[in-house]
Amino acid sequence: MKRRDFLKLSAALALTGAAAACGGPSASSAPAASGSSGASGAPAAPADSAAPASGAATDAAAGAPAGGRVLVAYFSATGNTAAVAETIAGAAGAELFALEPVTPYTDADLDYNDNGSRTSQERADPALQEVPLVSAAVDGWDTYDTVFVGYPIWWGGAAWPVNGFVTGNDFAGKRVIPFCTSGGSGLGRSGERLAELAGSGDWAEGRRFSAGAGAEEIAAWLAELGLQLL
Ligand SMILES: Cc1cc2nc3c(=O)[nH]c(=O)nc-3n(C[C@H](O)[C@H](O)[C@H](O)COP(=O)(O)O)c2cc1C
């Protein structure tokens, strides 16, 4: 399916209130374009925005919201999730932690139209979805009370490079809040599946954002969560 057709399908699903179809087999065979701007049409963030912005976060001592220290861990292949993660971190006074595959994904790797691409091959073989990360270990892990976990939707579910972070850490005693970006699909059951993988932590329902999600939308969500700093 072409990207234009996928976006039409997404729009139709959204109109019928069926955005959660991301977990279903039909949506799972028709992802949005890699590196795309998503359904919103807003430009994708630059790829290098996946790197944590140094100094963008505020730690607990400098005035984190009630509820304690907050971490925003995220994987982002083309920058969209990174942009949302940075906005969350800025508004919640959180630290950022970028999950970086040892072998970064190239544009060719992300081409879901190519059955031979890396992501297509990984999708077909769950063993290949155990993507080694540069690091899944967060300095001061025990000091965080709340952990956001961000990822793009790939074929209706959480992009698997986030799995190593989820399985590699003990979330006991932490509030965990998943969020994703996508070309149109909803969060679906991706957060629940990550909670199952983690096996610990108090996981919230989470939220899906479009690539061009604005600071106001994100701040409103943080306010609902009681995590807005400003
Ligand atoms: C391999 C692959 C599969 C995707 N599958 C879906 C999908 O099922 N549904 C959807 O809405 N978007 C899908 N997308 C689009 C991404 O979710 C979207 O562009 C996201 O914002 C990318 O985030 P990032 O820039 O942080 O990597 C897919 C993208 C790729 C590369």
Image (spheres, grey):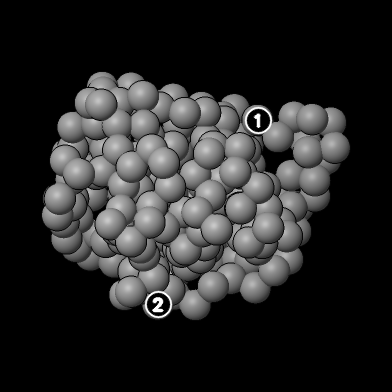
| Residue at the image point whose x is 16% and y is 40% from the top | 142
In this rendering, would 209 be left or right of 57?
right
The quadrant of the rendering that contains the C terminus is bottom right
* Pointer 1 residue Cβ closer than 8 Å to ligand 1: no
Q: Which mark is residue 20?
A: 1
Tag 2, which secondary structure?
helix
User: Which percent across, then down, holds residue 175?
Assistant: 36, 32
Q: Is residue 200 visible?
A: yes
In-front residue for pair 1/24: 24
Residue 159 visible in rendering:
no
Q: Name which residue lies at 80% across and 46% down.
A: 11
**What is the total number of numbered labels drawn onto the structure image?**
2
Q: Earlier in the sequence, mark 2 or mark 1?
A: 1
Mark 2–mark 1 Cα distance, whole angstroms, equals 30 Å
Q: In the visual, does 203 lie left or right of 30?
A: left
Please state if 200 lies on the left or on the right of 120 as rendered.
left
Q: Secondary structure at mark 1?
A: helix
User: Circle 1: is it few (<14), some (14-19), or many (20+) Cα within 10 Å?
Assistant: some
Q: Which residue is mark 2?
A: 48
Q: Amino acid at mark 2?
A: Asp
User: Residue 212 appears in which quarter of the rendering?
Assistant: bottom right
For the point 33% across and 74% down, which residue is it? Answer: 55
Badge 2 density bin: few <14, some 14–19, many ≥20, Cα 10 Å: few
Assess mark 2: CB under 8 A from ligand 1? no
